[in-house]
Image (cartoon, rainbow, N blue to C red):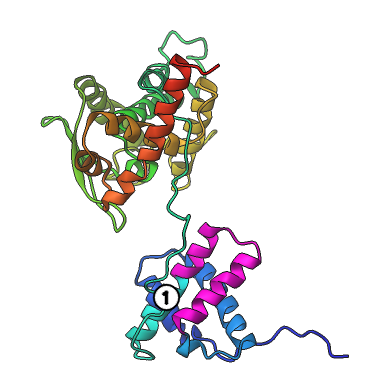
Amino acid sequence: MKENVEPQAKSRPMSGNSFEKYLQSKDLSKATIKCYNSELVEFIVWCDRQNIEVENSTSTEITSYLKHLQNKGQHSKTRNINLNILKHFFDWQIQVEHREDNPAKHIKIRGTKGRTLYPIFSKQELESLYQGYEIPTDEHKKSKCNWFGNYKLSRSRNKAILSLMIYQGLCTDEVNRLTLKDVKLREGTVFIAGTRKSNERILELKPHQIMELMEHTFEVRQSLQALALAESELYFLPTPAAGKKTITENDGINIWKRLSADMRNTDRKFINFKQVRTSVITHWLKQYNLRQVQYMAGHRYISSTEGYLANQMEDLQADIEQFHPIG
């Protein structure tokens, strides 16, 4: 009786790092590239079992592979990731002239467009998250402690961050990338640079934000800059880790960890900052048209904005149940 031996892939398209270099050109992270290569090997092994030449795969055979993944219990979203990997792979094969078409190009998987639905914060709850975030005064009972100065700076900075997330809908990555020149206090605007996934935009600041951001720019930020080892153009600087007097690169991670913990202490409904952004965009959709919201949110495609309509419908259903209960 023969042992069941895992078949070895006949070919390794990733050899020579050509496919890896192709993925690097798409600005994918090292972890993502590693994952893509691993999943691609699974496809190659499957092709070997089916006596299929990888380079000659057709759309019918790719559909069969996706069905195989479904039978293994993979959810639609996971299979969609595998499909995107194959689309990248065959695009690369076209680029290096191993084939002329991409057999995965027009294949779509149903049920993968859904956006995660978060419990939506009402406008009042969003305002409470912001207003409820207190900055300690010099009369605080711990004001004489040696860590109090940095603690006060971090709370002041965090409140400025919250204002941009709640009133302009910035996500954490956009806050991280914001520079000193992006915040234009004289014009009362903030510029958010675009990325490969989002469009740039200029958004108006609320009148009360201008004074707060002015204080951050000329007092809080300058104090934090004095603690840093090098000059930085970033608008929001971290505070030193506990027991340290200077700011290091790793301290930036602590901003979101600490602020998330603060938010959960303020409101148990808080899950993460994606929930805050989702709430902001959902409320925008009640006030502005799709194209306006697309611009304000920085979405590259209108379909991304439309994805938030599901949250709007969920929010509307909650209002109906609250004011017109059945039974």
Q: Quadrant of the N terminus?
A: bottom right
At a point 52% along the width and 91% down the height, the residue shown is 53
Determine if the magenta segment contains residue 64: yes
- Image coordinates of residue 15 in percent, x first then y, are 50, 86
Question: What amino acid type is highlighted by mark number 1?
Answer: Ala
At a point 32% along the width and 38% down the height, the residue shown is 170
At a point 40% along the width and 12% down the height, the residue shown is 137
The relative height of residue 127 versus residue 301 in the rendered view (above or below) is above
The relative height of residue 161 versus residue 308 in the rendered view (above or below) is above
- Image coordinates of residue 201 in percent, x first then y, are 20, 44
Determine if the magenta segment contains residue 223: no
The residue nearer to you, when weighing 85 against 201, is 85
Q: Quadrant of the C terminus?
A: top right
- Image coordinates of residue 290 in percent, x first then y, are 23, 41
| Residue at which label 1 appears | 104
The residue nearer to you, when weighing 42 against 156, is 42
Direction from residue 67 to residue 222 in the image, left or right:
left
Task: Indicate the quadrant where residue 162 lies.
Answer: top left
Can residue 251 be seen in this snapshot?
yes
Q: Main secondary structure of the magenta part?
A: helix
Range shown magenta: 58-84
Direction from residue 200 to residue 42 in the image, left or right:
right
